[in-house]
RNA sequence: GCCCCUGUGGCGGAAUUGGUAGACGCGCUGGAUUCAAAAUCCAGUUCCUUCGGGAGUGGGGGUUCGAUUCCCCCCGGGGGUACCA
């Protein structure tokens, strides 16, 4: 029998499906293990070889765990709502449901090709009404709860209503958008609408008017993490700040728990650091400054209350509520001009020109509560509306930005921290001795901060407080292809939750997907859907992309339940995700939202664990080689001119455009010698007919493709880079092609062999031959000249040693998630067995079981050929036996003063003294000691012997 | 700027708690087989060398009998984040 991958693959694919080999039951007799991949968004481009990297790793791990007696949950689904499908619909008119469905079918076929052991019966799609019924339900739970800071958990909003009814707002310590002060009588006198407005400030899912990231091109708002460098992450369109009424999720209520919960999980330090950074906890004081001739006070947050004697002016964000009130008649025009200027600037401009100092004086003064001096109140765009209180006390002597501002506008600077004891310390470092500060004089900064806060509390002008960078998550999108809100509004505009019985609220069909006028969702045009029979109006916005992905891992536990999002029994059994693998692009967004939802559900007693993902591994990206040709921007006689890379570098004054070239045309691609030869140039101009007749120039001459002569050795060097694998760079490698050519097992093992999972690396098809050879050699242990050659002979000691050391190495490395070294170990083992001409059943049987997680098709085939009936994937993973690894003697390197001078076999049962004596007696060693005194002999068992002279 | 990660042959990458640096694979060189090529098999492959050895894990210093591994400084590459008060 020849090793025919296609035949083997189709045979066992069918077998696995018919026998439900990968079906998982909620079997409580076995220990559970939950292995999860981040589910993909099914894009129109399909999978490239980079996508399955993590999937292969989890597949190996899941199979390994299953063979070790665990009941393994390893599901897959689709994050199927989202912008790209909708953009595609706007451009082509194809309904998002249709394109999404087609894309999913394509993904499924590609995934099946690689031989994954997913239990597809548990698959979920976030756009499925049966699924988003529960997304909507969880949203309503958030809507119906508030966060009690005293009990440190979410509680029903009804509790809050009871407190308000009995005592008013006094003593309530709840996360909110705005502090309220009212007594019970006030509350009881409020109209339903007024009550609703108050409660809205406490709900975990709430509405507020706020400045949001508005993207005109996409016609929607975006969450903070959907904006990168001032442009939208999807599409790269400009983003501006715009005031809109929006739904938000009060994730900030959970800031502290999201931070402390990181100690409970096994994530990489880098990832934890990113999350901590995003939460951005800072401790300090909150205090009020009185305003001259006004009853209002300005609230500020500072981490440096010790520098308050140096606070010589204040700055408010241009959007601050008090700005118009504080602006004097005299300054009015200037302030208005400045605010107009700020509003005219896009996010991107603001970010690009952070070093430019701008601001304007309001004309009003505040009183520094410690020095009792008048200090001017300014506005400036360097103070952000949504961080802290949107106002600062400026200490120009001890803050870089305040200093630049004061210097530009000629404001007073008072030194308050003496840093002379700390050479090299910057203004940002919290070190030095306090000066010019009355009672704090002589204190170290750390001590002074405490003293200042104490004084602030005593003076009753503020308190110790903690601030977070984390913002509440914007939850409204003015789009069609998302979950509709299960919310309807009455005539007063009060938001009313729908009943569970009425869920899911299905997304109505539509044929025009362009945004409606006024920044509204296209759903707003569907008046029959928007207006209910009872006279309510539905919310026309839809939920954002992260809604469905924030809880999908729970749904896999009980994917078909239509009474609950998942049953208590299944949640109690599966608990949480033991191993989660995915890319870093979700490091803050998805992982932060999921943890938030999970903690909320935990508070409700609906999930049994505090954290959803116990262990998390970030797989690296598989990149592609990108090859460019230099195209001279200036045409010559209407002819396009391409220039060799070396020529372009020598003439940097010319203007060039970089034209991506299909990597298949390029010789030595990815190397400094990458180039197009005459043949490549021909392929290029045949492909890009718009460049027909182009001229090619290199250091030796000029070439036009009319004069094609493939025998010429004309070369034009290309510029090669490593970057994204993408359609626009013509460097996409499709896993289907790899599987067709080399087989799924080979593709899987090669992806693992490429290097550590966490690392990014460029794809290089050239290396795949090594793995392909290995698999054929492995096959060769079973078949020679079409004949089955496995025999029943007893194994030799060497063979057992080769087998058991491989079992040991592979099982240890799988646990460490180090799969590249596993593949190497298999190669070493097979080379050893081949050199021993070993085709013994006792050796090969466990080897097949050992290799099965990596090469499932091949091993299933061989396993059955070895006479087994059931799947190899349900067999016991082989265990190693130390007995076979023991040795009589070990070769030791012997060094003199750390330099290796000899090597010697020493019996394993030799004592330290015996080993040393053997080493010292060696001729080679004697030569190097050469009369010198032996001061010390260092003997490291199983390692080395070093003689110090 | 700050935070995190990273730097090993021509290339991808191994190397246990500090203990023979370069496993395994690609590529390359030579040989076998072949009419020839592919495929396959065998041998070699860090660099220098006067063939005794010597140098070597981005650079410099330190700890140690011994450092790719630990510590300090510097340089390069990647990622995150940024008027965050």
Image: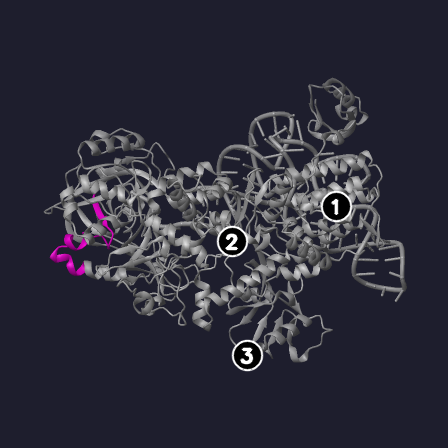
Determine crowd level at label 3: few under 14, some 14-19, many 20+ residues with C-alpha closer than 10 A. Answer: few
Residue identified by numbered label 2: A39
Residue identified by numbered label 3: A636
Res. A608 image quadrant: top left
Query: Helix or strand or loop: what does disc 3 sit on?
Result: loop
Res. A351 image quadrant: bottom left
Specify whether B45 is left or right of A333.
right
How far apart marks 1 and 2 lie (CA) works out to 35 Å
Determine crowd level at label 1: few under 14, some 14-19, many 20+ residues with C-alpha closer than 10 A. Answer: few
Q: Does the stretch in magenta take in A321?
A: yes
Q: Residue at x 28, y 55 (%)?
A: A496
Q: Are marks 1 and 2 on the same chain?
A: yes
Specify whether A948 is left or right of A591.
right
**Outermost residue, bottom direction?**
A637
Query: Helix or strand or loop: what does disc 2 sit on?
Result: loop
Residue identified by numbered label 1: A868
Q: Does the stretch in magenta take in A469?
A: no
Residue A182 image position (x, y, % from top left): 16, 43
The boundaries of the magenta stretch are: A312-334
């Amino acid at each position: 029998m020849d090793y025919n991958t296609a035949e083997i693959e189709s045979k066992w694919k069918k077998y696995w499906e018919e026998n439900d080999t990968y079906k998982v039951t909620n079997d409580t007799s076995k220990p559970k293990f939950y292995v999860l991949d981040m589910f993909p968004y099914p894009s129109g481009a399909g999978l490239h070889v980079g996508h399955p990297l993590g999937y292969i790793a989890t597949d190996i791990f899941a199979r390994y765990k299953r063979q070790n007696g665990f009941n393994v949950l390893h599901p897959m689904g689709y994050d199927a709502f989202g912008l790209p499908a909708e953009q595609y619909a706007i451009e082509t008119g194809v309904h998002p449901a249709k394109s999404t469905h087609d894309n999913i079918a394509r993904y499924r076929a590609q995934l099946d090709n690689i031989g994954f052991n997913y239990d597809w019966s548990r698959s979920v799609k976030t756009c499925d009404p049966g699924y988003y019924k529960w997304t909507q339900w969880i949203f309503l739970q958030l809507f119906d709860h508030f966060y009690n800071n005293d009990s440190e958990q979410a509680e029903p909003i009804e509790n809050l209503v009871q407190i308000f009814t009995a005592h008013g707002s006094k003593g309530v310590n709840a996360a909110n958008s705005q502090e309220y002060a009212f007594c019970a009588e006030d509350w009881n006198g409020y109209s339903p609408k007024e009550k609703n407005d108050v409660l809205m400030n406490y709900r975990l899912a709430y509405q507020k008017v706020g400045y949001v990231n508005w993207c005109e091109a996409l016609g929607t708002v975006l969450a903070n993490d959907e904006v990168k460098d001032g442009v939208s992450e999807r599409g790269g369109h400009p983003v501006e700040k715009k005031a809109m009424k929006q739904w938000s999720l009060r994730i900030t209520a959970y800031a502290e728990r999201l931070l402390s919960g990181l100690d409970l999980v096994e994530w990489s330090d880098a990832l934890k650091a990113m999350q901590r950074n995003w939460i951005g906890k800072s401790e300090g004081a909150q205090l009020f400054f009185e305003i001259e001739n006004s009853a209002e006070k300005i609230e500020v947050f500072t981490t440096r209350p010790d520098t308050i004697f140096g606070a010589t002016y204040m700055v408010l964000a241009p959007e601050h509520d008090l700005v118009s009130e504080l602006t004097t008649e005299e300054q009015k025009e200037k302030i208005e001009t400045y605010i107009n200027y700020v509003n005219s600037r896009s996010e991107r401009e603001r970010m690009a020109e952070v070093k430019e100092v701008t601001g304007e004086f309001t004309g009003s003064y505040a009183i520094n509560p410690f020095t009792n001096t008048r200090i001017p109140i300014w506005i400036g765009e360097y103070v952000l509306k949504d961080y802290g209180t949107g106002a600062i006390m400026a200490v120009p002597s001890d803050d870089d930005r305040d200093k630049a501002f004061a210097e530009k506008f000629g404001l007073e600077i008072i030194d308050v921290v003496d840093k002379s004891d700390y050479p090299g310390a910057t203004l940002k470092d919290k070190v030095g001795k306090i000066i010019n500060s009355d009672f704090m004089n002589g204190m170290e900064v750390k001590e002074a901060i405490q003293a200042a806060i104490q004084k602030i509390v005593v003076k009753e002008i503020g308190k110790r407080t903690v601030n977070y960078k984390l913002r509440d998550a914007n939850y409204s999108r003015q789009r069609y292809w998302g979950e509709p809100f299960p919310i309807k509004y009455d005539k007063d505009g009060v938001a009313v939750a729908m009943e569970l019985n009425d869920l899911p609220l299905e997304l109505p069909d539509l044929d025009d997907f362009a945004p409606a006028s006024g920044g509204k969702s296209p759903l707003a045009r569907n008046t029959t859907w928007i207006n209910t029979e009872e006279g309510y109006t539905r919310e026309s916005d839809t939920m954002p992309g992260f809604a469905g992905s924030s809880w999908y891992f729970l749904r896999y536990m009980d994917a078909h339940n239509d009474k609950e999002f998942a049953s208590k029994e299944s949640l109690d059994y599966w608990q949480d995700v033991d191993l989660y693998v995915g890319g870093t692009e979700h490091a803050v967004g998805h992982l932060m939202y999921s943890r938030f939802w999970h903690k909320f559900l935990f508070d409700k007693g609906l999930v049994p664990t505090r954290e959803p993902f116990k262990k998390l591994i970030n797989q690296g990206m598989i990149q592609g080689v990108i090859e460019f040709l230099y195209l001279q921007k200036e045409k010559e006689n209407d002819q396009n001119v391409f220039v060799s890379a070396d020529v372009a570098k020598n003439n940097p004054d010319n203007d060039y455009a970089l034209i991506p070239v299909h990597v298949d045309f390029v010789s030595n691609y990815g190397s400094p010698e990458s180039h197009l030869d005459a043949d490549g140039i021909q392929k290029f101009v045949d492909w890009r007919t718009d460049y027909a007749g182009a001229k090619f120039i290199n250091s030796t001459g000029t070439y036009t493709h009319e004069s094609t002569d493939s025998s010429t050795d004309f070369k034009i060097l290309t510029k090669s880079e490593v970057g994204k694998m993408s359609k626009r760079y013509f460097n996409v490698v499709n896993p289907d092609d790899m599987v067709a050519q080399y087989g799924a097992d080979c593709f899987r093992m090669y992806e693992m062999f490429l290097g550590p999972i966490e690392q990014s690396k460029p794809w290089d098809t050239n290396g795949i031959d090594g793995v392909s050879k290995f698999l054929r050699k492995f096959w060769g242990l079973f078949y020679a000249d079409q004949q089955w050659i496995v025999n029943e002979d007893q194994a030799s000691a060497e063979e057992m040693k080769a087998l058991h050391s491989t079992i040991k190495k592979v099982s240890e490395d799988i646990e460490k998630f180090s799969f590249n070294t596993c593949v190497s170990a298999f190669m070493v083992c097979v080379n050893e067995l081949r050199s021993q001409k070993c085709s013994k059943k006792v050796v090969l049987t466990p080897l097949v079981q050992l290799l099965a997680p990596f090469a499932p098709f091949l091993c299933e085939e061989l396993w059955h050929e070895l006479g087994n009936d059931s799947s190899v994937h349900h067999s016991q993973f082989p265990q190693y036996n130390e007995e076979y690894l023991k040795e009589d003697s070990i070769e030791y390197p012997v060094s003199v003063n750390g330099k290796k001078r000899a090597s010697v076999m020493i019996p394993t049962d030799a004592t330290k003294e015996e080993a040393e004596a053997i080493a010292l007696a060696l001729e080679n060693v004697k030569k190097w000691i050469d009369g010198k005194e032996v001061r010390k002999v260092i003997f490291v068992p199983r390692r080395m012997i070093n003689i110090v002279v």
